[in-house]
Amino acid sequence: MPSGLKGKGKALALACYLMSSPHSNMIGLYRLPIEYVHFDTGFSEDSIREVFRLFREEEFAFYDEAAKTVYIPSFAATQVARSLNPRDNRIPAIQREVDKTVHVGFKKQFLARYGQIYHLSPFEAPPDGSGAPSKGVRSPSERLKSVDNQGAPKGLRRDLVPVPDPVPEEDKRGLGREEDKQRRPPVSKGGEQPAQAGELMRMFQREIRK
């Protein structure tokens, strides 16, 4: 933990939250809307942004609010390993997490740090100016479900039927958590108020030790 975070209860609590968040993955590069952080911790969005600015200054974590993505550079080294044998069976899982990342800047930073020591595939920029849709995004014509018109008279052929895009995999843990009221911000032992930073930090630390 960076020395600049010592004595700053809310920053330490959020640091522990990022390391043990239910939205996190094994490489510390994952999607995290600020609304999730607010809901899970009870901290205001403004105070969360202030802590993220401190994280950036300390180079502990980097957050792109517009892209709803966080990157913790040291996370993989502590949660996976400082380096891996080329035959390590964790490499395919790490590669899959990297491939799912849509934030180009953070993906480049991760691969610059871990690409060689984790034996990962190098970064490949998407086609520039080719007009082809990026991976996972269908072109307008692909969003239309084909209809079997073979053999039908021209005047009786049916139009193509629009089909909505599927919900991205990472969104399945999204705001429905708030809507179905199944989760609540952590509360203090004494009542229903959101836990204070010091207690919240201890709660997240206990989770990390499990």
Image: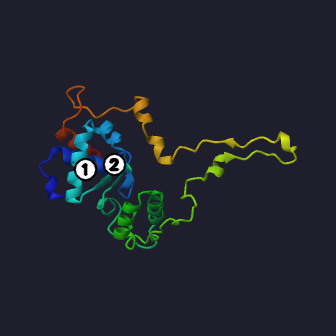
Q: Position of residue 45 (x, y in %)?
A: 27, 40
Residue drawn 22% across the image and 40% down it: 200
Residue drawn 28% across the image and 38% down it: 41
Q: Is residue 179 above or below residue 154?
A: above
Q: Amino acid at mark 2?
A: Glu
Residue under numbered circle 2: 65
Left or right relative to 124: residue 59: left
Disc assigned to residue 172: none
Q: Nearer the viewer, residue 155 or 120?
A: 155
Q: Mark 2, mark 1: which one is toward the viewer? A: 2
Q: Is residue 179 above or below residue 13?
A: above
Q: Position of residue 186 (x, y in %)?
A: 28, 34
Snapshot quadrant of residue 203: top left
- Label 1 crowd bin: few (<14), some (14–19), many (20+), radius 10 Å: many
- Quadrant (top left/top right/bottom left/bottom right) for the N terminus: bottom left
Q: Nearer the viewer, residue 150 or 140?
A: 140
Say whether disc 2 or disc 1 marks the residue closer to the N-terminus. Answer: 1
Residue drawn 25% across the image and 37% down it: 44
Q: Amino acid at mark 1?
A: Phe
Scheme by which the image is coloured: rainbow
Q: How many marks?
A: 2
Find numbered disc 2 in the image and state the secondary structure of the residue it sits on: loop
Snapshot quadrant of residue 112: bottom left
Distance of mark 2 from mark 1, alpha carbons?
10 Å
Find numbered disc 1 in the image and state the secondary structure of the residue it sits on: helix
- Label 2 crowd bin: few (<14), some (14–19), many (20+), radius 10 Å: some
Residue under numbered circle 1: 52
Left or right relative to 171: residue 193: left
Q: Position of residue 86 (x, y in %)?
A: 44, 73
Q: Nearer the viewer, residue 150 or 90?
A: 150
The reply to whether discs 2 and 1 touch (Cβ–Cβ < 8 Å) is yes
